[in-house]
Amino acid sequence: MHRYGDEVAAIARPLVDEGDLDVLLDRVGAARVVMIGEASHGTHEYYAWRSALTRRLIAERGFSFVAVEGDWPDCERVHASVRGGDASPLEALLGYERWPTWMWGNDEVVDFASWLRTFNMSNGREVGFHGLDVYSMWESLREILTWLREHDPDSVEPALAAYHCLAAYSEDPQSYAWATKFLRASCADSVVRMLIDLRGRDLAVWQNAEVVAGAEHYYRAMAAGGPTAWNVRDRHMDATLARLLDHYGDGSRAVVWAHNTHVGDANATDQAALGEVTIGSLARERFGVDQVVLVGLAGHRGSVIAGRTWGGPMTELPVPPGRPGSLEDVLHATAPPRALFVFPPLGERPDVLVDPLPHRAIGVVYRPEQEQLANYVPSVIGDRYDAFLWFDETRALRPLHPLHVDTHELETYPTGV
């Protein structure tokens, strides 16, 4: 018998269909924010079960919007579609062209967005779909200029100044990042002036200005190295989430979709020792532990969509069994093939929830042959999450189209999550 066998058996619940999520919905209770993770950006089971839980939170618990680890302009097309716009969810999601296209441009997200569009139109609801991420600097700048020329042409000058400054780098984040490091160049002042001018305006143009400011800061920090860039990105996503909750008003509730390395509480991993925060840890601080439920997802073996290099071809890759002694190895030996864990209160937790265990994290760049040397985050699982979905065997998700390689993207591997 495995040393954790009895403990896992006592807290694991078989996960067969959506009805088995009842106990997790009870755990959510009145919480304002539910963050649902994934151990990779390319696994069918993570996307499908995250969608299943989200559907129930929206339909039965009145959640107001879904906010994802995706770019604001791309997600706004999906947002328009799910609220009855002219474009279908498929058409909107085919518009995701920045690498990695499969992360949101896949059949699993089409299925969810199609359900959400039908739900909204059938129930008179306006549940939204928004992007939290920071990468879309030039796309957001163009959205700002288009909006200003239509709605406030007299105020276009600060945005044009920011655009002309950044245009010198040919929409190449890497060129801008290195220029800030080696040439002491910076567009920060013009970007901040634009942001000040647009704060408090229409949510979409205001958020696009926040994205430009966040991206400019992020790419400068990437060139400098250290944890700063990671924290710029997660703090931006945290602030965007708070802004969306304010926009939706009193009583609004949010579902967040992101990688486990963003959803999980950094304080329960070695991320805190590295000086990193996560949107999970920031949300617990901002809203209170009782108002936030963090849900992790993981699997033991199977296949995944990823690239072997940053910007490289989309590939279906094998996921080998979890390495010996890892959380994945423990659950393979002790848990049902599909299982739900809703963690008990702190004083009642078994050792498997309080012992630090390596926990796998697969990014958009993945090299299975390096599995034993990388891809694992030491984690106190009971503190990192409030609940956990487990899949012993997984398969790759279904991308909508072949990879579009954007060679101008600045590599963020190994934190390409």
Image: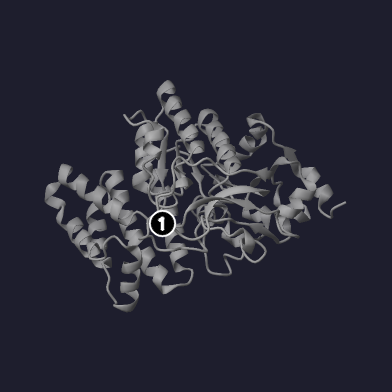
Residue 16 on image: x %, y %: 69, 33
Of the pair 373 and 417, the residue shown nearer to us:
373
The residue that label 1 is drawn on is: 236
The residue most toward the left is 154
What is the crowding at mark 1: few (fewer than 14 residues within 10 Å), some, or many (at least 20)? many
Q: Which residue is drawn at 23% across and 58% down?
A: 194
Q: How many labels does the image show?
A: 1
Indicate the secondary structure of the residue bearing disc 1. Answer: helix
The residue most toward the top is 122
Residue 156 on image: x %, y %: 16, 52
Residue 93 on image: x %, y %: 40, 39
- Residue 415 visible? The answer is yes
Report whether 360 appears left or right of 111.
right
**Colour pattern of the rendering:** one colour
Q: Which residue is drawn at 57% across and 36% down?
A: 53
Identity, as a three-letter code, of the amino acid under mark 1: His
Please say if 254 is above or below 20. Answer: below
Q: Residue at x 32, y 56 (%)?
A: 137
Report whether 355 appears left or right of 98.
right
Report whether 383 appears left or right of 250.
right
Report whether 299 appears left or right of 62.
right
- Residue 297 visible? The answer is no
Please say if 95 is above or below 267. Answer: above
Residue 207 on image: x %, y %: 32, 49
Q: Which residue is drawn at 29% across and 78% down?
A: 183
